[in-house]
Amino acid sequence: MMQLRSFVLLQTVFVLLSSGAANVIGTESTSKEIKASSRPRRVLYNFDGDSCLFTRAGREGPVALTVDDLKRAVAEVTESGSKVDTILVCVNAQVMYYPTKVGTQRGMQSTPEERAKWPASQQQMFANLERFFSQGLDPYAIMLDEAKRAGREALLTFRMNDDHGNDFLRTKFWVDHPEWRLSKGALDFGHDAVRDYVVALIDEAVRRYDCDGIELDFNRFPIFFKGESRDENVDKMNSLVQRVRSLLDTVGKERGHRLTLAVRVPSNYGRTPPTPESSRRLGCDVVGWTKSGWIDFVTVSEFLFERFDLPIKAWKQVITDVPVYGGIECTEGGKKEQYLNADGYRRAARNLFAGGADGIYLFNFFTTREYGAESWEPPFEVLREMTPTAIGGPEGKTLERSDVEFKIFQFPADKIPRIDGNSDDWSIVPNSYAIGMDQLQETVVGVGDRRDKSNLDVVVKVGWVKGQNHLYFLYEANDNYWDFAREDLHNDIFEVVVDGDLSGGALIRQMHPNLKLRDTLDTHFLFHGVHAQNYHIFTPAEGKDWAMVWGSQPWIKDLPFANAAYKYDFRPREGGKLVLEFFITPFDYAPPDRARAVPTTLVENKVIGMSWAVLDYDDEQATRYAGFWNLSHKTTMYGDASDLAAFRLMPMENSLRKAIECDWSFQVISTKDRSVAFRDESYGKITSWNWKFGDGKSSTERHPTHQYEQPGEFIVTLEVGGPDGKARRSKVWDVTLP
């Protein structure tokens, strides 16, 4: 064992010193550098590295491929309107798909007799790969570069323990060491040499390709250990994942940007849905990896067949630091008629979004092309629909104006708007965040889009602050007739409806889906405004509260949940300009009893549902307003959260940040062992990290885990550096251990 382990480590060093990346011919990358933790991923598309090397559009069966075919494979999933933000390219299945110095190249352990029995698809793939590499071309480098050229995140995906058992996937490592085998092709990760070998393969792949990072696919296949205790298995796999994170940080420093590390969690071979507990039983403490700051996002998928019951909510409850994506398999069974059509994909996506998935991960989407003359094209149209706003909730309800996504500006913590009716605080908000009269449509009286700005003109900006759960509004309106003399609802009104968790559906009792319950007061208290909230904001309010909450929770309009201030100099029936500044708190659950309420957690890139309407009265004696100008273009936005529009909580504008900012957080893993996981959350182009843990020990890892030998109160300091300078952040006694 020791001889083999030394051999693997030497191979790793060789790869470090002589990366094949310089000899790989691809196309020049044009993608912008994006911080992994804040990059939105609506759809993640997995190229398995297999089918894409012997199929293409059309029903031709296995064919010889050209460079243009490879580029087209990427282009057809990233063309205009596609929601695919991340491309993943697989380069292994125990064997590596390229000439390797560490492992075995695909098909090289097969005998001539075995090769002769290969199916036509595998023979064509082998021939295609041989031709590309003999010409000095790497097809996977070409696909990754093409993804970057299209502005997409380009990741490798690495199958951690493939167990197909085909002879063309046989490796010399597996042949030489029967004592380390599991099943048909998998390896036992309980052995140090196996884990060293896998890390060496990952090292080689990451250094060979100009990727944005790598996904560790523990779902291909979900088998890693035999014997030993569960805790021992977890410790060994923890060490492997931490080594890969350190490897990526090292390579990232060399390349001048952070590399993403993602994980696809192991399933239970379809027997039961994958859960955090079942994953840990297999040796994969995915929740612990996120808390340690090692991985940047998690994907939960089934094994091979679609079940429509992934427990995304259970994963979201325990993973709060990184996005959790939901996977869709291509078929419900082994027959052609069981492949998902467009409606099947829509159904699966709705279920995932209903569970709280941050995006959709597609696996084997393209395999309908593997049936030769009987092949058919996958439903590419769904790639333009895979967002909560377009695909809808569990009942298929979508948000209105699915082609539009409005932006919510992120204020710096030291520039939170003061609610005083002055717009000065909003001068830092770019005009691109302003939502004006041109976005509103009158949907009740019949005016439509015939706007007259001399009669009414409004501009709205919305903001948020990271760490708070408030939405800030600046409403500026010019009206030729302000109507606010009466004490009832006959008042110029700015009506805002917000659905913080995209739960959708009716929110007022008058629209309750059960007709028998619409007229009962019990429905008012149990239902009205509970999952989405409606604010009738009086513009202006004189002699009455600033807003009427249309629901059973009037307390949400008071501090500390809301506040408002006006600035104007006109009287009733006069014209002029009004400035309204206010904030509100959206709630996932807002019952009459405020002690039981659950505020919406606002985080970067989260999409919420929201809309507003301007109720414009032009006659104090009129029985109805002169216009209902609303943002969603659908009148029922006032009572149905599915009729709202999409708003995204944006990251902070670069112009408001320093070139380099230091910040970090920590998680006590074990008070008994005094083990603490530290997570860097700094901003900028950072190439070095220097941690001082307050006990005389230090680390240069980005996300270190440290074990304190003694109890105490510690001053922990992180200093980061890069081409734009240095920054430091200390926390005094935050880390206190018994």
Image (tube, rainbow, N blue to C red):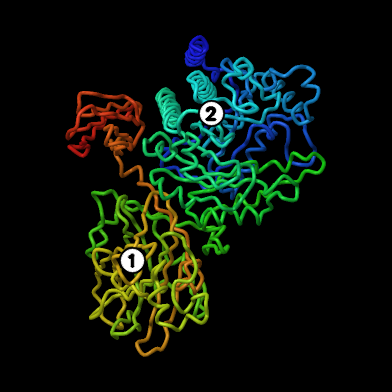
Vertical order, 126 against 321 (above or below): above
Q: Earlier in the sequence, mark 1 or mark 2?
A: 2
Mark 1–mark 2 CB contact (< 8 Å): no
Category of crowding for the residue at label 1, using alpha-carbon neighbours closer than 10 angstroms: few (below 14), some (14–19), many (at least 20)? many
Residue displayed at 69% across by 17% down: 109
Q: Relative to 724, is 177 on the left or the right? A: right
Q: Secondary structure at mark 2?
A: loop
Say what amino acid the circle numbered 2 marks: Lys
Can residue 92 be seen here? no
Q: Furthest residue to the top?
A: 3
Image quadrant in which you'd find residue 495: bottom left
Residue displayed at 42% across by 52% down: 606
Q: Relative to 134, is 660 on the left or the right? A: left
Category of crowding for the residue at label 2, using alpha-carbon neighbours closer than 10 angstroms: few (below 14), some (14–19), many (at least 20)? some
Q: Furthest residue to the bottom?
A: 621
Mark linked to residue 417: none
Image quadrant in which you'd find residue 303: top right
* x and y percentages locating residue 423 in the rendered image: 27, 61
Say what amino acid the circle numbered 1 marks: Tyr
Foreground label between 1 and 2? 2
Vertical order, 631 against 190 (above or below): below
Closer to the camera in the image, 275 or 613: 275
Residue displayed at 49% across by 31% down: 213
Closer to the camera in the image, 574 or 538: 538
Residue under label 1, please give it: 475
Residue under label 2, please give it: 226
